[in-house]
Amino acid sequence: GRAEEASGAAGSLSRTGTAVVAAAAPPPVQGRGARCLERAPGASGNSAAARKAFTLPDLTEQFSPPDIAPPLLIKILEAIEKKGLECATLYRSQGSSCIAELRQVLECELSTADFESVDVQTLSDALKRYLLDLPNPVIPLSVSSEMISIAQDLQNSEEYAHLLKKLIRSPNIPHQYWLTLQYLLKHFFRLCQISSKNLLNARSVAEIFSPLLFKFQILR
């Protein structure tokens, strides 16, 4: 059922967050051109939710190696880590930012953008909205089920890290997806390192972000 699937996704991300310490950085990409995945079901359409969504390009269109992550994502996370990493309500407050505030972040001109004046609540809402409005989930549909299954079966975090990398670095998945996930996992790990202050551990981070990383599988 939906609850079991969400629980499995949360467990997968918890295990992934723990395993990221042991996960080595992916090797340089050689001769691998960027390509878009097939748009996930529900990512576009005439629904009210779709009309309210921000227009974000596929990850393959946002950056290419040797860049390590989408520039907008980097900028948002850098600002959050500078201003709010120790905030006791980080990511847990119900999204209260207005569309205009989110637009200020998500549709800014990156070359001149300065997020110093943006409050942490708006930045955290912007990160969630960014992940939600990507045309395809960071963890693609083609590997999510197997990833959840592996997370439920394995107990060794190093072995899981190895299989995770192998799975998401499949030739059928653009490298930008692994790089983006890796960048997010590093942020999640930093959150968990100071859980005594922000009250975020691997499980709570997983519960917050799994629906966004596996979004169409859980929210369908």
Image (cartoon, rainbow, N blue to C red):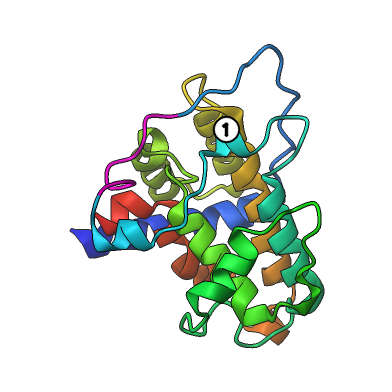
Question: Which of these two is toward me, 176 or 7?
Answer: 176
- Where is 142 relative to 147, above or below? above
Q: Quadrant of residue 179?
A: top right
Looking at the picture, how far across and down is residue 210, in whole percent? 44, 59
Residue 205, percent from left and from top: 54, 69
Q: Position of residue 84 (x, y in %)?
A: 73, 79
Of all residues shown, which one is farthest toward the left? 1
Q: Amino acid at mark 1?
A: Thr
Asked whether residue 10 is in view, the answer is no
Q: Quadrant of the N terminus?
A: bottom left
Residue placed under numbered mark 1 in the picture: 60
Q: Residue at x 72, y 71 (%)?
A: 80
Q: Measuring 54% from the left and 38% from the top, which residue is drawn there?
A: 164
Main secondary structure along the magenta-highlighted residues = loop
Q: Which residues are magenta?
A: 37-45
Looking at the picture, tell me which residue is in the foreground, 175 or 73: 73
Q: How many marks?
A: 1
What is the x, y in percent for residue 91? 56, 76
* Closer to the camera in the image, 27 or 150: 27
Q: Quadrant of the C terminus?
A: bottom left
Q: Is residue 182 left or right of residue 125?
A: right
Q: Nearer the viewer, residue 116 or 183?
A: 116
Determine whether 122 is above or below 150 in the image: below
Residue at position x 62%, y 83% from top?
199
Q: Is residue 202 above or below residue 62?
A: below
> As drawn, is 216 to the left or to the right of 13?
left
Q: Secondary structure at mark 1?
A: helix
Q: Is residue 142 magenta?
A: no
Task: Classify mark 1: residues with Cα within 10 Å, few (<14), some (14-19) or many (20+).
Answer: some
Task: Determine whether 188 is above or below 119 in the image.
Answer: above
At horizontal 50% and vertical 27% (from top left) the residue drawn is 173
